Image (cartoon, helix red, strand yellow):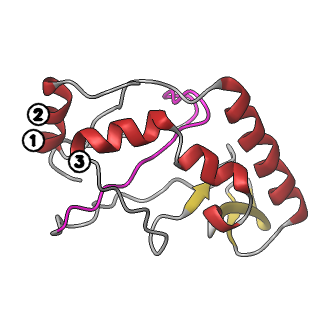
Amino acid sequence: MTTLNREDIWLFQHNGFIVAPGRLPEDLLGLVDAETDRQVAAQIKPISWAYDIGDPEKRIVNRLSKLLQRDRVYMEAATHPVVLDALEGILGPNIELLTNKHNMEMIKPGNAPPVDWHRGEPISEPLVVTMVIAFDDATEANGCRLVIPGSQ
């Protein structure tokens, strides 16, 4: 069990985000990665497209939408104890999985256009938390995510 400590919770409350402790098992990440490759290759809808920044005539798959309904492996990742333990530290034990927003996987191949600056969802009551699971190391070279404290 990977739980949040008091500092993690304080950081979330003040910054609006944290990097949660723990990692999904490598075998589960491999299954998700393989299923994603299959879904992209087959262009299984609903998908979103972007234009290749090197070739504006070429479209590339940018996002798989309705992810949790696509294959059981996505739900397995979303409900893995590593994810649920981190969420429980913020939300308490009554966690509800919403699928009407952010139920997607951003593909973001290296030739996809950058994501424009944007702000997270406004604070709501009850609290809604978005969990982002990164499947690749995020580096400056591959376009890591920048989250500004207080913006989320």
Q: Residue furthest front?
A: 93
Q: Which residues are magenta?
A: 126-142
Residue 15, quarter of the rendered image: top left
Q: Secondary structure at mark 1?
A: helix
Residue 129: within the magenta?
yes
Of labels 2 and 3, earlier in sequence is 2
Q: Position of residue 89 (x, y in %)?
A: 25, 38
Q: Main secondary structure of the magenta part?
A: loop
Residue occupying the point 19% across, 47% down: 16
Q: What residue would you read off at disc 2?
A: 10
Classify residue 125 by image quadrant. bottom left
Locate residue 29, reporting x and y percent. Answer: 68, 34
Q: What element does badge 3 sit on?
A: loop
The residue that appears at 62% across and 62% down in the rendered structure is 68
Are discs 2 and 3 less than 8 Å apart at CB? no
The residue lying at 37 percent from left, 36 percent from top is 85
Figure check: 54 above or below 2: below
Quarter of the image where the N terminus is located: top left
How far across and how far down the image is residue 118, in percent? 33, 61
For label 2, the crowd category at 10 Å Cα-Cα, with few meaning under 14, some 14 to 19 and many 20 or more, is some
Crowding near the residue tagged with mark 1, few <14, some 14–19, many ≥20 C-alpha atoms within 10 Å: few
**Drawn side of residue 18 relative to residue 47, left or right:** left
Q: Which residue is mark 1?
A: 14
Q: Total of numbered circles in the picture? A: 3
Label 3 sits on residue: 92
- The answer to whether the residues at label 1 and label 2 have Cβ atoms under 8 Å apart is yes
Marks 3 and 1, how far apart in space?
18 Å
